Image (cartoon, rainbow, N blue to C red):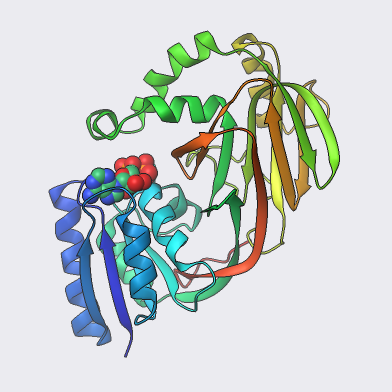
Amino acid sequence: MKRVTVILNPNAGNAHQRRAIAQGITEWRSNQGWQVRLRETRKAGDATSFAREEAKRNDLIVAAGGDGTINEVMNGLVGTDTALGALPVGTGNVWVRELQQSLNPLHAARQLADGHVELVDVGQANERYFLLMAGVGLDAAITREVHSADKKRLGRLAYVIKSLPVLWRLRGTRTRISLDGQPLKGNALFVLISNSRLYGGVLNIAYRAAMRDGMLDVCTMMGDSALDAPKLLAGILFRGYGVIQGLEYVQAREIEIACSKPLPIQVDGDAIGTTPMTFRVVPQTLRVLLPRTTEIN
Ligand SMILES: Nc1ncnc2c1ncn2[C@@H]1O[C@H](COP(=O)(O)OP(=O)(O)OP(=O)(O)O)[C@@H](O)[C@H]1O
């Protein structure tokens, strides 16, 4: 018998999605014979402490929330034998999209019942682990402006609206990056350090990323202001890394970033601090439960 704890962020999602989760749990109990407990978070940070506690007595911890809740749960599971599962109740649901898992929580629960476990790499930003990616500069500045009420009201459109004033103010910041000891300097607009491929659920920026290769994929976007953004975006879409000026793609195990002024940093969609920061890969350290048909890169 499988012992499972579902950690639910009651702030994410709507009543319809929560009913679907309750239905999924009922099916796990009756069809799979799983012993399932539900715990609801009350504040940011709860999901990590709950996951750490529950990892001692469970085979599987399921994060029911958005990517932020999944990130908090995986921070409590790294290095344990307990697997991470996800039920999508968030705004972006990038992890669930990356796994080609259903965005309907009940269908996603059925896929997990029939799923398989794989061991994957995670990234680390100073002490904080990340599953998908870390962003320095532009995207973290936008993330800081998007509050959970905005996401509830506007969904993913909140990111588009909040990006406009951030883009207006955007200026390149003198930045030194060390990629496994190799220096890279320039005026950074945005640096993406990725463990997985799908950025924001829509764009394959780190198109070579693989979650079991023991590497992080680093995309650096240098420039003076948002006027450089269309060129850089075209470079990303047409894979012009190393060809378009200011756009580079490198794989590394350890990345240090320092800037002339502190730049914001986000991991898995939540703002966590500012530069300077060191990022590293922790290879094959997290068990994840995937739909049967999903093959992880
Ligand atoms: N009960 C709670 N009250 C307030 N904040 C919470 C609670 N539970 C979790 N959080 C915080 O809310 C953040 C965002 O939640 P979550 O990721 O689940 O939803 P979302 O932001 O709508 O989705 P996405 O990350 O996919 O955009 C989490 O990173 C976590 O720190």
Residue drawn where x is 31% and y is 91% of the image: 1
Residue drawn where x is 31% and y is 65% of the image: 50
Residue 12 seen in the current view: no
Task: Tell me: residue 76, above or below residue 113.
Answer: above
Residue 23: percent from the left, percent from the top?
16, 67
Residue drawn where x is 33% and y is 58% of the image: 47
Nearest the camera: 189 or 243?
A: 189
Residue drawn where x is 62% and y is 17% of the image: 229
Residue 227: percent from the left, percent from the top?
63, 9
Counting the numbered discs, the total is 0
Nearest the camera: 24 or 191?
A: 191
Q: Which residue lies furthest to the bottom in this view?
A: 1
Q: Quadrant of ligand 1?
A: top left
Residue 109 location, quadrant: bottom left
Residue 231 location, quadrant: top right
Nearest the camera: 227 or 263?
A: 263
Residue 243: percent from the left, percent from the top?
83, 26
Q: Is residue 64 left or right of residue 136?
A: left
Residue 223 seen in the current view: yes
Residue 32: percent from the left, percent from the top?
27, 85
Q: Is residue 38 left or right of residue 46?
A: left
Quadrant location of the C terminus in the rendered image: bottom right
Task: Tell me: residue 256, above or below residue 235.
Answer: below
